[in-house]
């Protein structure tokens, strides 16, 4: 099995605060990996270090290696702009740009060199179709993205990442701000996207993790307690903390 | 006394003070407008002033005020927006940055007469720009530039962090993110702030007395070559602005209708400043609605 990404002994600090301890995880291609655990256990922090998003936080320091093929993402020399094109990210709250639906998708690819209108038109359609959003938006592509519902906005954000044809898509609780129907559409979408992409998704909804993921990592206080096939982790966890958490005894 | 009574009394006092201030303001505005509006006519707005005869206008002064404003903004808008972007997006939060911020604050609150005298010493005499629109614009830059920096910084800081993250997550560079994601969102704030600041320099007099000067050469409004001495567009000619003109005719006006001219000119000035203020609000609201309309 080929690994799309592997973190080795990753530590993340916010000033003095040690938020992620010695985490080593491998993420397989064309699989969904879920990160679960109680609030504040470092899931988002870990996820955001995978595409160097934590660079935005001045107090944040990351040590350890994150290997993508032969390349160490954590190297000083890494071109983060090129890196983030390869590793897309979807955030907890839908954050479309203050632009039209079309521009939300075309903005990234155009910046990365796709200039022809026909190519862009084509890509916008493909990406919206992949995000199951084409039928709802094809008549108003040039209207503001803010006219969409929350669930539609989140699918637009997914389409926006997909349009760059990344290798990996990171998602931080992508449906936690949405209603149940929108949530299940996002879940269907993730299941389809995994045919093409490696997906790492943070969720604090254990049922969601069980429904959509192939592997699950259970985080507790900044450490990974258990990492295994999702079925195994939920049905027959090897650690006591894991079984306590999934049976709802804390968190 | 119960807390509620205290609350009521305090509210009453505050309302009374606020009402009193509003009344003073309305009274002042009304007084200036009523005294002056009657004197405003097309002839008054377009013809040149007379020094001893009656019937002079404020045409060149009005033109000078507008032109000086444009010149100043040509200098301060690019510099101010550039510096504002630097301060909000690039400057590290350290002592140097807070020192720059302090200087900016102090500069913008400098007494304008001091800035005028400084301009006379340095710009007019030392650098030899003479009494000119150019000297005036540089003097006004001292007030306006800090405001532009602050306005831009505020506009950019007001953009939600999520927008920046969304752009970075697509592998968009920082500069492109600033240009194409942050600045468009900050534009309504920056634009209305710029207009408000422009209103302030439109009414400025003290800083211009000794920089742009207190006289206006005979202008030839058919000559638009900025290098001709009599062209209105020549930035190196002296230029009395409307506010300076009001001050001058009030203190040394010889024309028999000097009082009416001062009153008319004051009304015009007040109206222009009001237009700037209301325009800034309207534009800001319009653009804000346009961006968030679809919500
Ligand atoms: N920007 C930050 N600065 C300082 N501490 C932070 C920051 N972001 C998160 N933390 C802390 O790091 C820990 C992990 O947070 P987070 O990764 O957001 O957890 P999770 O996503 O699992 O809820 C928490 O204790 C949180 O308070
Ligand atoms: Mg989180």
Image (tube, helix red, strand yellow):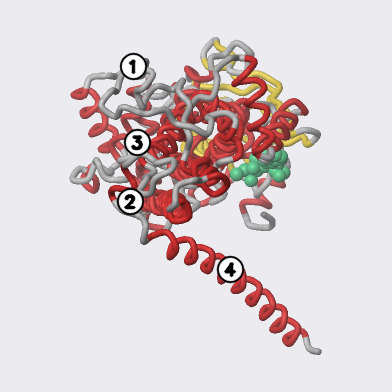
Q: Earlier in the sequence, mark 1 or mark 2?
A: 1
- For residue B171, which numbered disc appears in the image? none
Name the residue beneath numbered marker 1.
A113
Q: Estimate the spatial distance between the alpha carbons at disc 4 and disc 3, rounded to whole Å.
A: 51 Å
The residue that disc 2 covers is A148
Q: Tell me where residue A106 appears, x and y as whole percent.
A: 31, 30
The residue that mark 3 highlights is: A104
Cα separation, mark 3 vs mark 1, equals 16 Å
Can see residue B22? yes
Give the image quarter of residue A85.
top left
- Of the residues tagged 4 and 1, which is closer to the observer? 4
What is the secondary structure assignment of the residue under circle 3?
Answer: helix
Cα distance, mark 2 to mark 4?
A: 48 Å
The answer to whether the residue bearing label 2 lies less than 8 angstroms from the nearest atom of ligand 2 is no
Spot the residue most to the bottom.
Answer: B1
Could you tell me which secondary element the residue under label 4 belongs to?
A: helix
> In the rendering, at what x and y percent does residue A187 appear?
40, 46
The vertical placement of A8 against B185, above or below, is above
**Circle 3: is it few (<14), some (14-19), or many (20+) Cα within 10 Å?**
many
Tell me, yes or no, whether dots 4 and 3 are on the same chain: no
Marks 3 and 1 belong to one chain: yes
Locate residue B169 relative to residue A24 in the image: left or right: left
Q: Label 2's element?
A: loop
x, y percentage for residue B88? 60, 32
Real-space CA distance between mark 2 and mark 3, rounded to the nearest whole angstrom: 12 Å
Mark 2 and mark 3 lie on one chain; the one further toward the N terminus is 3
**Which chain's residue wears label 1?**
A
Residue under label 4, please give it: B24
Q: Please identify the quadrant where the C terminus of chain A is shown.
A: bottom right
């Amino acid at each position: 099995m080929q690994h799309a990404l592997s973190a080795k002994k990753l530590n993340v600090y916010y000033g003095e605060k040690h938020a992620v301890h010695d985490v080593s995880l491998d993420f397989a291609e064309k699989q969904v990996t879920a990160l679960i655990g109680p609030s504040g256990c470092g899931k988002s922090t870990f996820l955001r270090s995978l595409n160097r998003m934590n660079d935005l936080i001045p107090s944040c320091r990351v040590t350890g290696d994150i290997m993508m093929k032969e390349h160490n993402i954590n190297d000083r020399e890494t071109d983060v702009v090129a890196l983030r094109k390869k590793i897309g990210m979807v955030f907890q709250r839908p954050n479309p740009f203050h632009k039209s639906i079309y521009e939300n998708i075309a903005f990234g690819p155009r910046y990365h060199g796709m200039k022809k209108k026909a190519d862009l038109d084509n890509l916008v359609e493909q990406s919206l179709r992949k995000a199951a959003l084409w039928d709802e938006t094809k008549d108003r592509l040039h209207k503001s993205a803010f006219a969409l519902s929350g669930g539609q906005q989140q699918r637009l954000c997914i389409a926006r990442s997909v349009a760059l044809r990344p290798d990996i898509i990171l998602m931080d609780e992508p449906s936690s701000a949405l209603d149940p129907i929108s949530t299940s559409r996002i879940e269907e979408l993730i299941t389809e996207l995994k045919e093409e992409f490696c997906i790492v998704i943070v969720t604090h909804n254990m049922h969601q993790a069980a429904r959509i993921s192939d592997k699950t990592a259970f985080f507790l206080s900044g450490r990974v307690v258990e990492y295994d096939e999702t079925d195994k982790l939920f049905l027959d966890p090897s650690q006591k903390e894991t079984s306590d958490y999934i049976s709802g005894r804390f968190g | 006394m119960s807390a509620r009574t205290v609350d009521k009394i305090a509210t009453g006092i505050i309302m009374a003070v606020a009402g009193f201030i509003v009344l003073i303001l309305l009274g002042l505005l009304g007084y200036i407008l009523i005294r002056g509006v009657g004197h405003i006519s097309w002839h008054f707005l377009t013809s040149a002033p007379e020094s001893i005869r009656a019937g002079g206008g404020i045409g060149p002064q009005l033109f000078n005020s507008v032109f000086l404003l444009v010149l100043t903004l040509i200098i301060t808008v690019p510099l101010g927006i550039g510096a504002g972007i630097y301060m909000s997006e690039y400057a590290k939060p350290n002592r140097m940055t807070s020192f720059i911020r302090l200087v900016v604050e102090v500069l913008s609150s400098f007494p304008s007469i001091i800035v005028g005298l400084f301009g006379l010493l340095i710009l007019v005499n030392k650098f030899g720009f003479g009494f000119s629109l150019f000297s005036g614009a540089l003097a006004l830059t001292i007030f306006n530039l800090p405001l532009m920096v602050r306005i831009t910084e505020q506009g950019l800081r007001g953009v939600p962090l999520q927008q920046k993250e969304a752009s970075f997550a697509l592998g968009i560079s920082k500069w492109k993110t600033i240009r194409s994601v942050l600045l468009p969102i900050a534009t309504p704030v920056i634009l209305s702030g710029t207009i408000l600041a422009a209103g302030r320099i439109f009414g400025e007099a003290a800083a211009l007395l000794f920089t742009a000067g207190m006289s206006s050469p005979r202008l030839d409004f058919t000559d638009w070559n900025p290098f001709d001495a009599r062209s209105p567009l020549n930035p190196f000619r002296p230029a009395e602005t409307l506010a300076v003109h009001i001050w001058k005719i009030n203190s040394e006006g010889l024309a028999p209708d000097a009082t009416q001219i001062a009153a008319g000119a004051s009304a015009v000035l007040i109206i222009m400043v009001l237009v700037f203020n209301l325009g800034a609000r309207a534009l800001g609201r319009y653009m804000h609605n346009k961006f968030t309309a679809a919500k």
